[in-house]
Each structure stands twice: as C-alpha cells, then as structure tokens.
Amino acid sequence: MLIAQRLLDEIDSYDLPEALAKLQETGQAKVSELTRRRIMALFNKRPYSTEFDEIDFIRRVWPTHRMSSIFENAPSEQTLDDDLFNALVRNNDWDNRETLEAVGYLSCSQRQFFRFLEEVTSPLTQSPDAQIELAAAINEHLRHDGYRLIIVRRMSGSPVYEVQPAALGSPADDGISQALADFEPDTVAARWTQALDRRDTDPQGAITLARTLLEDVCKWIIVEAGETYEEKDDLPMLYRKLKLAKILNLAPDGHTEPVFKQILGSCQSVVESLGSLRNKIGDAHSPGPKKVKPAARHAQLAVNLSGTMATFLVSTWAATKGRPYSTAITGRR
C-alpha cells in the first residue's frame, strides 16, 4: 500500500486510487449492491441536482476526463467525459441509470460511493426542500447496512451531510419507523427520520422535531376522526382540548383500573413535558442568555419518548377504527 500511495503522488490516475481505496476498505461494513440499486432508483424520476446540469454534476463527483471510454472500439484518446458529452449533451439518449452505470456507480469503492451521496445531498447541489427529502429517502435505504447521512455542519444555514456509521440508537427505532411509515409515510414518518438524523448531532433541533412529530400525529388522527383544530393550538391543546384523548379513549378518568389510570396519566405528562422541553431548550425560540444547552442524551430521551408515544397513538387509533395493528407493532397481520 505504501508503494501504491507513492505512485498516487506521481501519476494522474483514477483507477489506482480506486483500487487502493477498495483494499483499505477490507473489513469495513459494506453497503450492498441491492442498497446501491435502491438508491439509484430514487433518480428514476428526479434529477441528480436542482442546481447543476446533469453532466456538470457528474463531473463534480467523478474525474471523467481521467476515466477511459466505456466503448471498446473508441479511439485511445477518447475518455468517459467524451462519452458523457455525446450521450447527455449532443444526443440526450442516456437516462440517469445508464449514466450512473457508465461511471461505475455499482462497482466503485465505498469511498467513491459515499462521495456521490454527500455531493448529491449538498446544499450546493439541491434546493432546501429537495435536499431534506432526498437525504431522508437515502437514509431509509442506507440504514439497513449500518450507515446514515449525518448533518456535520452548516453552510449559510443549510445542512451539510456526511456518511457515517449509524449510531446504535434505540432498539425500538426500526419498529417505530415501520409503524409510522404504515400510518403516513410522507409527513409523519419523514419527521421521525429527521429527528433520528439529528438526535446525536443537533440536540436542539432533534428536541423540536420530537414535539413536532407528536403534533403531526395528533393532527392526522383528529382530522381522520372528523374533528377540527386551530392552527394556534399547541401540542397539549391538541391532546386535551381537541379531545384526542377521548377520541382514543386515553383519558385517565375513563378507566377504573388504577394501573391504567396511572399509565395514561403518565402519557399525558409525557406529552406536556415534551412541549415544555422544546420551549425551554429546543431551537424553536431564541435561546437568549440561558446557560443550559441540551446534550445528545437529552435529545435521545426526547426523541425516543416521542417516537414511542407516537407509535402508541397510531396503534390505538388503528384499533379504534377496527384496523389490524401494524405488523411492526404486533408482529403479525
């Protein structure tokens, strides 16, 4: 490897660094070909970038001018960059899948694959809404192989992502993820994923998202139940004033068994406490001169409580409507 590293300093090559990267990745957790294909499929109906032309984005990730043409009979001086220019600019006859296959997306080193993921979710590459949506969609696939896109810093207020091994987190994370995805995948499940993403790296943001997750669930159930709410209603108001507890028969006074009254009373306290915690140390309001800042363990507690409570509400609503519980909750259909 030392010899290879010295050669890298002397020659302009793509293949040699790739070969060295693959050697250095021996023993690392691998992202499977299936996961790579699932992530590639995300671009079947969306562009790689909202801010760059297709070929310009590919050039940001792969040194195509130093890569050989994929065509066997091409002149020796023809590069992959020439292939891409002909296919994407002159003829417009390659789709996103064909372009990624041409640059070696499926077989490249994991280092190069992660570079693609970090560049495709960069704030320079995507609009704010597209960036958040795409990062969440990629993480939904990456998590199966033990990796996540994590926010590591901010660029002019926008998140910058980096692929890192996923934190072990709570054993219930997968079950909660599945239950909320079954209930409402676009808003509720996405909010949960965002909270998970920030749980270890952005405690204030994670605590705010923990409360917002419960607000989302409450509002969805209220609407499905035929009730209404006002936009000014906060989380405790949604849970109590708008009768969510009665819709789900969760009011402590509605039960005679002491242990159930105690548990349901504690659930109400969790809801109110999450709202208070978010107001005190979340990022929804100006912190002012306060001295206390949440640590990762505080965010883990808030997010885990919120996810557990959200799953309980969703499963109780399913039972109230006579639907079968999610397989993530019951383990059967």
Image: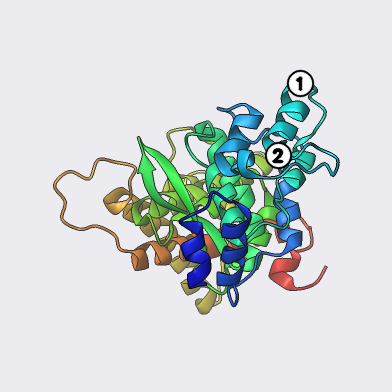
Tag 1: residue type?
Arg
Question: What's under tag 2, amino acid-wise?
Answer: Leu
Residue 313 visible in the current orientation: no
Q: Quadrant of the C terminus?
A: bottom right
Position of residue 285 measured from the top left corner of the image (x, y, whole percent): 29, 41
Q: Pointer 2 and pointer 1: residues touching (CB < 8 Å)? A: no
Q: Residue, x 59% and y 41% (percent of image)? A: 133
Measure the alpha-carbon separation of dots 2 and 1. Answer: 14 Å
Residue visible at 28% across and 53% down? 281
Q: Which of 259 and 82 is in front in this view?
A: 82
Q: Is residue 100 left or right of residue 241?
A: right
Label 1's element? helix
Q: Of the numbered discs in the image, which one, if any, rests on residue 80? A: 2
x 75%, y 41%: residue: 69
Rendered view: 113 above or below 259: above
Residue 122 placement (x, y as % from top left):
50, 40
Q: Residue 141: give its label.
A: none
In the picture, measured across the screen, residue 281 lies left or right of residue 106, that is left
Q: Residue 90 carries which label?
A: 1
Mark 2 secondary-structure assignment = helix
